[in-house]
Image (tube, rainbow, N blue to C red):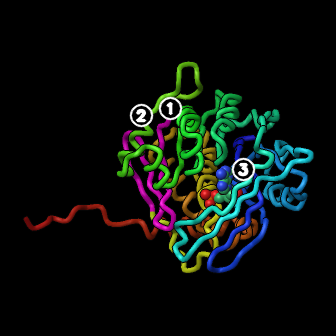
């Protein structure tokens, strides 16, 4: 087993200008796992309630995802999120969040999940992220996502969680909110300076990815900067889960290259695959599009994205 993910496994009610869905399969860990499953074996860790259907588990199984770590809590309710988008699909309003079975949840990783060498701490309460991180102190690569809610109500645990991972993947607005720095590069550099407390796992983040919705994503390390636009689409139906799908592409690509150093070439390839995976996710509601996605479709968009982001490098002799 190569990638373990912990995060929300959810029912989502979503309304966009193009339609609505009630209680569809969602959750950060689910979107991540479906995307990452194109690259490597993935094990999902997290609780669900009695109301979670076999049908939803079958969606993950059909992509080969290991669902042994999904714990069914008797008498509990599955995490529920309700969000609405206006015409600007880059911003959304959370109408309701019900933690349900995540309240009081104590993750115990299965042997399969523990044997992974890559770990993704998808969006959930940062103390839970840390509990999972503590069980996998020797993971080769650990990445984390979060959101404004946790920056607002659990800032200190979130800072601790971030200091224990290699890579942080956040929206640009979240990165600014987290650091109090309005400039994206300065905000990323601040995160890159955070170190784990004595005795805590990890060496501190060395990669920061700032997601910018329909404008793409930027990658900042101590040595470099790289950015890609989003894959241009004429039809976007539902952006829910785009960030997690992006992370699934990013982390999945890194997991699929176990012997390559975490250098510029690997990180840029990960950015391209993340961008392309996310582009499919937003074409339909929830997990609908990714459930049908074929590897050949991914490869085709990677070729397109490569072609549309190249330019001649030699500087022109400019007139002074
Ligand atoms: P994204 O659009 O990639 O930011 O993620 C959307 C997913 O995150 C949805 O499927 C929700 O179920 C899930 N989600 C929303 N709010 C939270 C939260 N507070 N904690 C964990 N997951 C959440």
Q: CA distance from mark 2 to mark 3?
A: 28 Å
User: Quick check: marks 2 and 3 in contact, CB under 8 Å?
Assistant: no
Q: Is residue 62 left or right of residue 174?
A: right
Viewer-proximal residue among 157 and 161: 157
Residue 35 is at least partly visible in this image: no
Residue at left offset 61%, top offset 40%: 258
Instruction: Respond yes or no on whether mark 3 lies under 8 Å from ligand 1.
Output: yes
Q: Which residue is mark 3?
A: 8
The residue segment tinted magenta is 205-228
Which structural element holds mark 3? loop
Q: Secondary structure at mark 1?
A: loop
Q: Which mark is residue 193?
A: 2
Residue, disc 1: 204
The C terminus: image quadrant: bottom left
Give the number of the mark in front: 1 or 3. Answer: 3
Considering only order in the chain, which callout, 3 or 1, is on the residue closer to the N terminus? Answer: 3
Q: CA distance from mark 1 to mark 3?
A: 24 Å
Q: Looking at the image, is mark 2 or mark 3 nearer the viewer?
A: 3
Where's residue 3, x and y in %? 70, 43
Do the residues bearing badges 1 and 2 touch, measured as CB atoms within 8 Å? Answer: yes
Q: Is residue 317 above or below residue 175?
A: below
Indicate the quadrant of ligand 1 in the picture.
bottom right
């Amino acid at each position: 087993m190569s990638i373990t993910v912990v995060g929300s496994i959810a029912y989502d009610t979503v309304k966009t200008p193009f339609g609505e869905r009630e209680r569809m399969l969602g959750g950060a860990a689910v979107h991540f796992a479906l995307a990452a499953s194109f690259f490597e074996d993935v094990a999902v860790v997290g609780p669900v309630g009695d109301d979670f259907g076999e049908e939803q588990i079958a969606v993950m199984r059909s992509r080969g995802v290991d669902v042994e770590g999904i714990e069914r809590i008797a008498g509990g309710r599955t995490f529920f999120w309700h969000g609405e988008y206006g015409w600007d699909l880059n911003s959304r309003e959370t109408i309701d969040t019900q933690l349900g079975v995540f309240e009081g949840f104590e993750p115990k990783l299965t042997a399969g999940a523990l044997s992974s060498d890559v770990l993704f701490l998808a969006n959930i309460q940062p103390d839970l992220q840390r509990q999972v991180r503590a069980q996998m102190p020797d993971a080769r690569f650990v990445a984390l996502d979060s959101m404004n809610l946790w920056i607002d109500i659990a800032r200190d645990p979130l800072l601790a969680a971030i200091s224990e991972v290699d890579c942080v993947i956040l929206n640009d607005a979240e990165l600014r909110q987290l650091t109090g720095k309005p400039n994206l590069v300065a905000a990323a550099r601040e995160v890159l300076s955070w170190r784990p407390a004595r005795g805590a796992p990890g060496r501190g983040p060395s990669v920061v990815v700032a997601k910018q919705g329909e404008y793409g994503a930027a990658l900042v390390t101590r040595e470099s900067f790289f950015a890609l636009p989003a894959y241009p689409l004429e039809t976007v139906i539902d952006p829910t889960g785009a960030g997690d799908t992006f992370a699934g592409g990013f982390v999945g690509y890194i997991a699929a290259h176990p012997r390559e150093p975490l250098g510029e070439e690997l990180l840029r390839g990960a950015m391209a695959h993340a961008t392309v995976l996310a582009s499919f996710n937003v074409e339909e509601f929830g997990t609908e599009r990714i459930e049908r996605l074929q590897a050949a479709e991914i490869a085709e968009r990677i070729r397109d994205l490569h072609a549309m982001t190249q330019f001649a490098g030699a500087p022109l002799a400019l007139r002074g």
